[in-house]
Image (cartoon, helix red, strand yellow):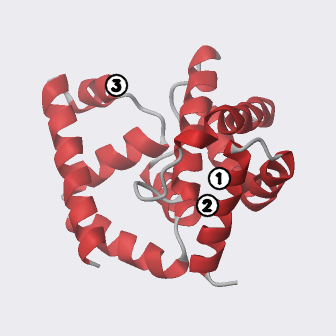
């Protein structure tokens, strides 16, 4: 199955989940759980909390599937963001606010959200960002750091950190749209 076909199949399954189809939820789980579990393990730092985060991710999917908009993000990206947020909440509740480094975050980003062709495009676009923007984006979105934590680590005002990340994301989006 081509990456485009896999994306369409996942989009369709999420639409069926929104309609209350439990078998569609099982299909989404089968197609995505390994990737999402990897994100949860990396952020929470242990298997038990990662399992809790993964379960809660699919509960959120069941409740929020009607909010998925394939014109805004791919299904796997949307699910990764739900898993990431859930894992961060669990990690923080258990006193773990820190995890791996930029290399792990980049690996999770490229392996968990995009096809091989898209991965190359994403890597090329990430390389165009300055080192700070790239690091801040990866740390915020995949290591679980809040903007406030990143600002303190970089010794810069919170507003400046938010602006740098926003500008970096806008540049990344432009680059990906042009690719």
* Residue that badge 2 annotates: 11
Q: Position of residue 161 (x, y in %)?
A: 20, 34
Secondary structure under the numbered disc 2 in the rendered image: helix
The quarter of the picture where the C terminus appears is: bottom left
Query: In the displayed structure, would residue 129 be above or below residue 82?
Result: below
Quadrant in the rendering for residue 7: bottom right
User: If you read the primary sequence from the N terminus, does the residue marked by circle 3 or circle 1 appear first?
Assistant: 1
Q: Residue at x 19, y 24 (%)?
A: 158
User: If you read the primary sequence from the N terminus, does the residue marked by circle 3 or circle 2 appear first?
Assistant: 2
Query: In the displayed structure, would residue 160 be above or below residue 94?
Result: below
Q: Pointer 2: residues within 10 angstroms few (<14), some, or many (20+)? A: some
Q: Residue at x 53, y 40 (%)?
A: 67
Query: In the displayed structure, would residue 178 be above or below residue 54?
Result: below
Q: Does residue 108 appear anywhere in the picture?
A: no
Q: Residue at x 61, y 32 (%)?
A: 87
The CA distance from mark 3 to mark 2 is: 34 Å
Q: Are marks 3 and 2 in contact (CB under 8 Å)?
A: no
In the picture, the disc for residue 15 is 1
Q: Are marks 2 and 1 in contact (CB under 8 Å)?
A: yes
Q: Nearer the viewer, mark 3 or mark 2?
A: 2
Extreme-front residue of the structure: 19
Between residue 121 and residue 99, name the one nearer to us.
121
Quadrant in the rendering for residue 53: top right
The CA distance from mark 2 to mark 1 is: 6 Å
Q: Nearer the viewer, mark 2 or mark 1?
A: 1
The quarter of the picture where the N terminus appears is: bottom right
In the picture, the disc for residue 149 is 3
Q: Position of residue 35 (x, y in %)?
A: 68, 56
Q: Position of residue 84 (x, y in %)?
A: 56, 39
């Amino acid at each position: 199955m081509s990456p485009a076909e896999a994306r369409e199949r996942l989009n369709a399954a999420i639409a069926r989940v929104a309609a209350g189809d439990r078998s569609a939820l099982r299909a989404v789980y089968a197609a995505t759980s390994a990737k999402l579990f990897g994100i949860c393990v990396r952020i929470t730092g242990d298997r038990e909390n990662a399992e809790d985060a993964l379960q809660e991710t699919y509960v959120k999917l069941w409740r929020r599937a009607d909010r998925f908009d394939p014109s805004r993000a791919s299904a796997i990206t949307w699910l990764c963001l739900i898993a990431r947020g859930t894992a961060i909440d669990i990690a923080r509740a258990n006193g773990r606010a820190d995890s791996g480094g930029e290399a792990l975050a980049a690996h999770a980003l490229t392996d968990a959200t995009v096809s091989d062709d898209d991965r190359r495009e994403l890597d090329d676009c990430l390389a165009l960002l300055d080192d700070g923007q790239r690091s801040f984006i990866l740390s915020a979105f995949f290591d679980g750091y809040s903007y406030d934590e990143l600002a303190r680590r970089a010794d810069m005002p919170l507003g400046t950190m938010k602006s740098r990340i926003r500008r970096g994301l806008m540049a990344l989006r432009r680059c990906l749209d042009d690719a």
